[in-house]
Image: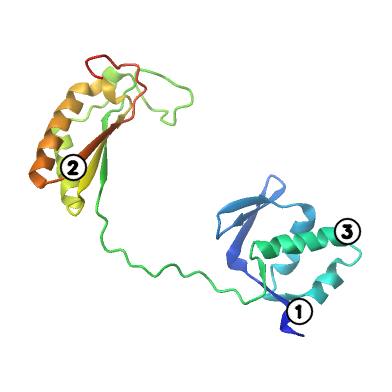
């Protein structure tokens, strides 16, 4: 059997699952997801247990079982994804990089678990009203800033995110933390950015 007549099966290139009766293929190299038709599913099921498959085996298996053009298209689709290939498959071992440091660049402060809205699409289902929310106290916030400065010591710029709940419901803390972070970053020779995730309903001219 000639090498030109042989296809290698790369089982590292895909995962396929049954989703409510539909076969779906996850293409590992691209993370693309493909809805498999019946013909491609049959071809995939045939080649999956094999390390290699020849054109003769494919011809013998699918001769008379459907349109030759559809079978050929399914094989070409699997070849284009690298599931079937002309050379032996090699598992991806990664880049071989060892990460020994994890310098922080951002810290997220949940300043109040309460929110003044009850949006049905919100991913946080346990929010309460701002007055009943758990508010971050200034001492913990300072420790968080110090943690950011310590763990991000090699960073020239750091970022502080105010989050909630609705963070504007604890504006007093936000002002205090902003002043503290700006002062400490000046001392450490760093730039600091601030960002805020808000529904904007509590914005006033003074806050803006």
Foreground residue, 154 or 13?
154
- Residue at numbered disc 1: 5
Residue at the image point whose x is 44% and y is 67% from the top: 94
Query: Vertically, is 28 above or below 58?
Result: above
Residue 146 x, y percent position in the rendering: 14, 44
- Residue at numbered disc 3: 67
Foreground residue, 94 or 109?
94
Asked whether, in this view, residue 73 is left or right of residue 135, the answer is: right
**Which mark sits nearer the N-terminus, 3 or 1?**
1
Give the quarter of the figure containing the N terminus: bottom right
Q: Image quadrant of residue 20?
A: top right
Q: Image quadrant of residue 51?
A: bottom right
Q: Are marks 2 and 3 in contact (CB under 8 Å)?
A: no
Asked whether, in this view, residue 111 is left or right of residue 69, the answer is: left
**Which mark sits nearer the N-terminus, 2 or 1?**
1
**Which mark sits nearer the N-terminus, 2 or 3?**
3
Query: Can the viewer see residue 17 in this picture?
Result: yes
Looking at the image, which residue sits at the far bottom? 1
Residue at the image point whose x is 26% and y is 20% from the top: 169
Within 10 angstroms of label 3, few (less than 14), some, or many (20 or more) residues? few
Which numbered circle lies on residue 191?
2
Q: CA distance from mark 3 to mark 1?
A: 21 Å
């Amino acid at each position: 059997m000639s090498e030109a007549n042989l296809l290698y099966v790369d089982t590292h290139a895909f995962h396929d699952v049954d989703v409510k009766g539909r076969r779906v293929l996850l293409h590992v190299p691209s993370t693309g997801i493909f809805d498999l038709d019946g013909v491609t599913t049959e071809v995939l099921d045939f080649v999956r247990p094999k390390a290699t498959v020849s054109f003769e085996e494919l011809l013998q298996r699918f001769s008379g079982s459907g349109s030759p053009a559809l079978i050929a298209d399914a094989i070409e689709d699997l070849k284009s994804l690298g599931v079937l290939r002309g050379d032996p498959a090699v598992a991806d071992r990664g880049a071989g990089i060892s990460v020994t440091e994890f310098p922080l660049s951002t810290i997220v402060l949940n300043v109040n678990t309460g929110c003044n809205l009850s949006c049905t699409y919100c991913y946080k289902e346990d929010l309460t009203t701002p007055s009943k929310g758990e508010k971050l106290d200034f001492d913990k916030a300072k420790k968080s800033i110090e943690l950011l400065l310590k763990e991000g010591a090699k960073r020239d710029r750091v970022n502080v995110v105010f989050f909630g709940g609705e963070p504007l419901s604890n504006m007093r803390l936000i002002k205090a933390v902003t002043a503290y972070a700006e002062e400490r970053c000046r001392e450490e020779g760093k730039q600091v950015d601030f960002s805020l995730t808000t529904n904007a309903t509590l914005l006033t001219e003074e806050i803006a």
